[in-house]
Amino acid sequence: MSDEYGQEPHLELTSSLVPLFVITNGRALPPDQEYERTALVTARKEGGAAARTLSPEGQVIMDLVADGFLSVAEVAGHTHLPLGVVRILLAQLEESGLVLVRKPVPRADPLDRELLGAVLDGLKSRFGA
Amino acid sequence: MYLDPDVLRSVKILVVGPFGVGKTTYIGNISEIEPLQTEEEITEASVGFDDLSRTPDKTTTTVAMDFGRLTLSEELVLYIFGTPGQERFKEMWEELSRGALGALVIVDPQRLDESFPVLDLVERFGLTYAIGVNHFEGTTTYPLDEVREALNLPADTPVVACDVRDQHSAAQALITLVQHLKSLLA
């Protein structure tokens, strides 16, 4: 295909993309690692003022994490918003100082004996094994 | 619904296997919360006549993935992600495997051939794993050694019976995996 004959370049509007685009206010996806699905999120108590200008979906997330920590995956699960959209919204909320994010254990740590011991002890005491 | 306020660390383990092998049942049985789903998009090449015209058509599909949660101590929580084992989900594997402690591979002893693509992905993404051989109603229990042989597994890879409908059995498979992970550090 070429544009040799002076055709107008196509402007492709894919209707199904529009709602997501609006929800995220045109923001792109942050890199995966920033809001890994096991990152833990809660609302900052002092974030009241900025909260007034939130999108409806942003407000839904703020209400959900108002009283405690949930993982990014749980935020997506409870709100039924696609994971990618949740990540973008969380990036906006964190940037506005509205949420606190605890990053998961980084990659090097699976080699951590102490951590694996804690996982094993936790499973054993939970299931009486 | 909320995590313990003192929870500081989160870890994850993947529960992987072919379609219909019992991942959802497994997670439902072991999770402390009602299992949830994430909706995510995967991009894949369109199949069909498009291939002949060499157009790089890609389609976006939304897939729903189950996961569950287990609080292990005041400060530690484990998330368990059901992960489909087909090649077309490899984008998701890339992110899911990052930082994962390991994987529990659920196999159906009557359809072992379906487990090869799964083992392929697990090994490609460098995940340490254990095999849980699901027991299906109305079937005989398979000797675990036969499964090990058929799947051509390394000698130290644990192979355990795992009835996904039974919480104790499901938990035991997870414990076996973590013991294996720990033993590799010794």
Image: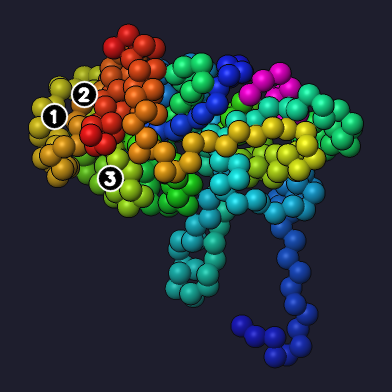
Q: Which residue is mark 1?
A: B144
Q: Which mark is residue B119?
A: 3
Q: Is residue B166 above or below residue B54?
A: above
How far is the residue under mark 1 from the one under mark 2? 7 Å
Q: The disc labelled 2 sits on which kind of residue?
A: Ala
How far is the residue under mark 2 from the one under mark 3? 17 Å
Mark 1 element type: helix
Q: Is residue B70 above or below residue A47?
A: above
**What is the quadrant of the C terminus of chain B in the image?**
top left
Stretch in magenta: A60-69
**Crowding at mark 2 (Cα within 10 Å: few <14, some 14-19, many 20+):** many
Q: Is residue B134 above or below residue B32?
A: below
Report whether mark 2 lies on the same chain as mark 3: yes
Q: The disc labelled 1 sits on which kind of residue?
A: Leu
Q: Residue at x 67, y 39 (%)?
A: A86
Q: Name the subunit of mark 2.
A: B
Q: Residue at x 86, y 28 (%)?
A: A48
